[in-house]
Amino acid sequence: MDPAFDHEQLHKDLRAMLENEEDWIAAMATVACEIFNRDPLVNWAGFYRVVAPGLLKVGPYQGSHGCLSIPFDRGVCGRAARERRTQRVDDVREVADHIACSSTTLSELVVPILDGDGSVHGVLDLDAETIAYFSEEDSQAMEQLAEWLGRRYFP
């Protein structure tokens, strides 16, 4: 992400904003908005929610249209949900089953939202129009955010 992106400040701000917020949809909308507006090169920031076994549906997001449905057996988001682990892709054109919701996206970071039992409730999806835009530091910071969201909304 942008070298000026302050992960620590994002986490601090989100904890304050969501301190008394119990609604998961409002929380997802707030997280997507904050990430999207803090990094000008992120062209899509949002969530896909688990709505049935093996199926993700688009949730709150910022950016161009998202794919409406993603099965667990397709794409980077599906893989993150299926394997329950972060997927950092430097060049989505090299991923055979990548689902191109936007033709301009070149790199992607997808982090699962898990509850305390390890069940997946959704994924946080970040896209950029730059190859290898997301770093290991970005992955770790978004994993920390996802862990907090999972504990907070799916205890």
Image: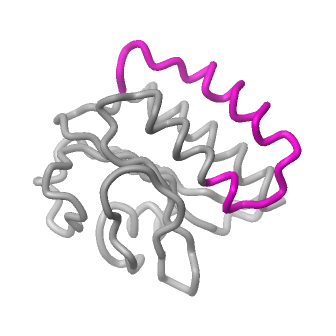
Number of numbered discs overlaid on the protein picture: 0
What range is drawn magenta here?
1-28
Point out residue 54 in the picture as x, y percentages from the top left corner: 49, 83
Instruction: Confirm whether the magenta stretch covers residue 54.
Output: no
> Is residue 121 toward the left or the right of residue 80 in the image?
right
Front residue of 60/147: it is 60
In the rendered structure, the answer to whether residue 34 lies left or right of residue 71 reads right
Residue at the spot x=66%, y=29% of the render?
A: 11
Q: Is residue 27 left or right of residue 23?
A: left
Task: Provide residue 120's location: percent of width, then percent of height.
Answer: 61, 67
Identify the coloring: one colour
Residue 71 percent coordinates (x, y)? 39, 80
Quadrant location, the C terminus: bottom right
Instruction: Give the farthest residue toward the right.
Output: 20
Q: Is residue 11 above or below residue 64?
A: above
Q: Residue drawn 79% across and 31% down?
A: 16
- Pick the quarter of the image with the N terminus: top left
| Residue drawn at 41 percent across, 76 percent down | 72
> Residue 14, percent across and down?
69, 34
**Magenta stretch: includes residue 17:** yes
